[in-house]
Image (spheres, helix red, strand yellow):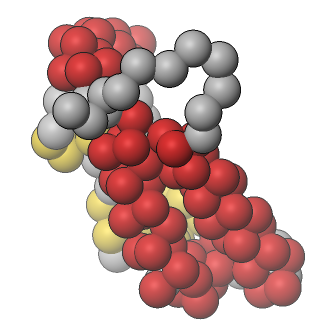
Amino acid sequence: MRTLNNFIDGQWRPPSNATHLPDINPADTEEIVAKAPSSQAADSVMAVEAAERAYPAWRATPAPQRGQLLYRVQRRMEARRRELAEVLTREEGKTLAESAGEIQRAINVVEFYAGEGRRLLGETIPSEL
């Protein structure tokens, strides 16, 4: 069984209280899908502080480059579409068709926002020079 942790400041970290809770398949309550972190306020504070430290570098990254990162996420999601739908079904008790639709919607949202880096709206300044 897989034990999940928090991704904070570029690293996978166990919750500060070292406690994990079972993620139970609602369609088969005998199946524990994974052990999820029982994160506390301290974990949230660490995540927010890490995001604040990372923000200046992310802000300085040209929008088209940020878009390319999102396109990579989109391609990876598309390549693992079936696996993601199966995991979602096990975690939430949805039908596979519902899960596949939700994964496709997520892929569509990522693709839309990846393209935002190239949309010219309002005042623009060349950021790739």
Q: Nearer the viewer, residue 42 or 64?
A: 64
Q: Is residue 114 visible?
A: yes
Q: How many marks?
A: 0
Res 3 → quadrant: bottom left
Give the image location of residue 32, x and y in percent: 52, 71
In the depicted structure, whether residue 106 falls above or below residue 65: below
Q: Is residue 30 visible?
A: no
Give the image location of residue 67, x and y in percent: 43, 48
Residue at the spot 28% in from the left edge and 10% down from the top edge: 52
In the depicted structure, whether residue 19 falls above or below residue 34: above
Res 30 → quadrant: bottom right
Give the image location of residue 8, x and y in percent: 24, 32
Query: Dividing the image into 4 quarters, which one contains the N terminus?
Result: bottom left
Residue at the spot 75% in from the left edge and 64% down from the top edge: 105
In the depicted structure, whether residue 98 falls above or below residue 111: below
Give the image location of residue 83, x and y in percent: 53, 85
Q: Nearer the viewer, residue 59 or 8?
A: 59
